[in-house]
Amino acid sequence: MITFDKVTKLYDDRTKAVDQLDLHIQENEFFVLIGPSGCGKTTTLKMINRLIDVSEGNIFIGDKKVTDYDIHELRWNIGYVLQQIALFPHMTIAENIAVVPELKKWSKKKMHDRIDELLEMVGLDPAVYRDRKPAELSGGQQQRIGVARALAADPRIILMDEPFSALDPISREKLQNDMLHLKRTINKTVVFVTHDIREALKLGDRICIMKEGKALQVGTPDDILHKPVNPFVRDFVGAHRQDERIDLESFVLPLDGTAVSHRLSADASLAEVLEKLSQHEKILIEKDGKSIGLIDRQTVIEYMANRLNERGREHE
């Protein structure tokens, strides 16, 4: 769907923001770019819709270079959500959502129906919100409108540049959960930039960890956690703590009658759990000779994401 072929971005001061980047983002994939500040993740995102131009190499959408598209056509067909929500303050919510459909000359009825559909999709009652102004909404509600506006003209690709980072923790958690629901229903290719490893693990189908303009590792959350390619990635995701003991009892899933032959003790280390889950989808957890529940890969990924988030708060 989106291919980076030896892409480099070199600024006038000779700063190399992106360095010989090769990536392939699959159709309908939720692809996360993450890394420390200055690693090139936002530059990489903005080169897709040509907010920043490539210095060397090529970016393709399908079989066509992004530089071969009419720039207006390119941007109309790529939704964009950013941290600074940037709704037009003098326009109603409905008018904000309709910006690109109006440019594409949709009929009034088609726009009306699409606005209502999108407001319902992001959990806002059209009868209540369509005629309000942005200032009448909370930050979380405004960001929902930002997502709805990006989806308005039914683009194939959505770019999201740290869209939730300015929100309070409760609103952020809610919007992350909303995105999990949306990614199962909207069938879009989403490229998502974040600095929060918990968010990346929670949302991404695949994650690209960047440093100094290079992609150090691209893989599923499972890959990133189980098989970090170097010490930087291992430290970045906290995988060096795999010898710690974890409280399996606190997050086991209920026994559901599924026949599971692979077992672990409730006092197993994180490394033991990850090793077992690299081979099997589910594991039966036992304590004092009795089965107390099941764990699966997603449950452990969410546990590790939460632990990483807690450590981040401890150092704030």
Image (cartoon, rainbow, N blue to C red):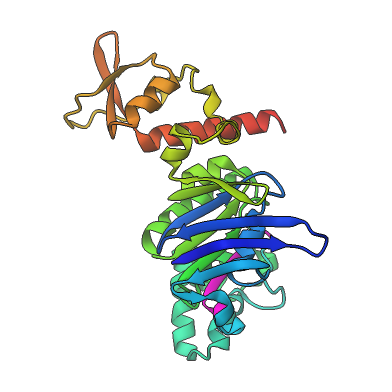
- Left or right position of 23 against 81: left
Question: In this view of the protein, which residue sits in the foreground, 100 or 17?
Answer: 17
Question: In this view of the protein, which residue sits in the foreground, 281 or 144?
Answer: 281
Horizontal and vertical percent position of residue 103? 58, 87
Residue at image x 53%, y 63%?
A: 5
Horizontal and vertical percent position of residue 193? 59, 54
Name the quarter where the N terminus is drawn: bottom left
Q: Which residue of the protein is positioned furthest toward the right in this rendering?
A: 13
Give the mark count.
0
Horizontal and vertical percent position of residue 145? 57, 66
Whether residue 270 is visible = yes
Horizontal and vertical percent position of residue 295? 33, 29
- Left or right position of 309 against 256: right
Residue at image x 58%, y 31%?
A: 231
Q: Is residue 266 above or below residue 74?
A: above
Q: Is residue 189 above or below residue 41?
A: below
Q: Is residue 198 above or below residue 144?
A: above
Location of residue 293 by image quarter: top left
- Residue 27 among those drawn in magenta: no
Write the start and end of the magenta stretch as one range.
74-84
Whether residue 143 is visible = no
Residue at image x 61%, y 53%?
A: 164
Question: In this view of the protein, which residue sits in the foreground, 167 or 311?
Answer: 311
Question: In this view of the protein, which residue sits in the foreground, 311 or 33?
Answer: 33
Location of residue 20 by image quarter: bottom right
Name the quarter where the C terminus is drawn: top right
